[in-house]
Image (tube, rainbow, N blue to C red):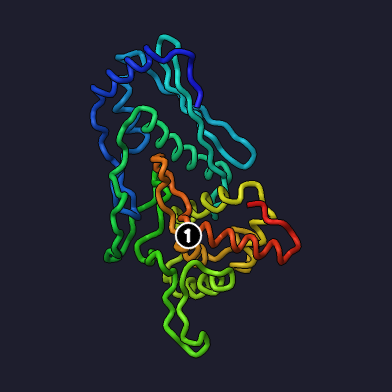
Amino acid sequence: MNHSETLAKLADALAKAQAEMPVVKFNSINPFLKNKYADLGALIETSRPVLQKYGLAVSQLVSGEGDAVSVETVLLHSSGEFIASKISLPLGEEKGKSSAQVAGSIITYLRRYTYAAALGMYADEDTDGTTLKPQPRAEKSAAHTPESEPTRNEAELISEPETVVEDKPDATKGGKKWSRPFTPESLKEALWVKAQKISNPANEAQTKLFTALWMEYFGKRDDERRLVQEYLTGKKSLKEIDGRMLAAMLDWLKPEKSPDGSGMYVISKLALQELAAVVKFVTEANGQQALI
């Protein structure tokens, strides 16, 4: 985070602005978690008159760094004082979307969260600690819009933390039941069984979330990522992985909100432990050294 040498005037103006800031209207509905949220337009429309009254403004600058897109949010005061913070996410790959479209979705996502965070605005219903229960499936699901946020997978794909797949004992598996943490071999087997049981492949938002988490974990270690993908799914490229397998892998990652309060999703600790074991297994098998 960057800021001017002094912040007294900005702090005073921001405190007054927050005291008068109207409650932002939750004008959008997440089609997967069914929770309401305020889109970027609602945040800007609600805050602009109060910001103007106290000499405040928000500027959001977009840039690209390698395979990632970044948004720097700058909170400015008419005195020249400022606070700036920057956040980045990897672009990843999405079926049926150009790189520009993927970047646009991520930019909107980052702008919305960082705008609300900079002004201390409440833009989402609090679903932390809420148990997601399977809901009756509607004949038609809500349409995905550019403002729809990547969220964890739909209720039917969520299983208990202790096990991703509860397979019925049969002769081929000797009556065993998978338990966590998975070994690389049992994880691979569990994912394939899970993928076969899933009725619906990963949708656009689920694919977007998985891609963002997956690419963020591996960073620029593309060779390592492809080895892991090939071992677990039989495909080196993300674009070639079947939608049902993507849904199974997202279920395994068990995305959860980051403890830093940013509202961003991160891979669960247990899945991180298992993923690190897979990376070590496949890199050693290929005569490489895991960079984790």
Q: Which residue is mark 1?
A: 270
79 relative to 208, above or below: above
* x 31%, y 42%: residue: 124
Circle 1 crowding by C-alpha within 10 Å: few under 14, some 14–19, many from 20: some
Q: Position of residue 175 (x, y in %)?
A: 46, 86
- Residue 274 appears left or right of 29: right
Q: Residue furthest right?
A: 287
Q: Residue furthest bottom?
A: 171
- Residue 50 appears left or right of 278: left
- Say which of 283 and 263 sits in front: 283
Residue 228, located in which quarter of the rendered image?
Answer: bottom right
Q: Amino acid at mark 1?
A: Leu
* x 30%, y 49%: residue: 127
Q: Position of residue 206 (x, y in %)?
A: 45, 56
Name the secondary structure under disc 1: helix
Q: Position of residue 113 (x, y in %)?
A: 40, 37
* x 47%, y 82%: residue: 176
Figure disc tally: 1
Q: Position of residue 8 (x, y in %)?
A: 38, 13
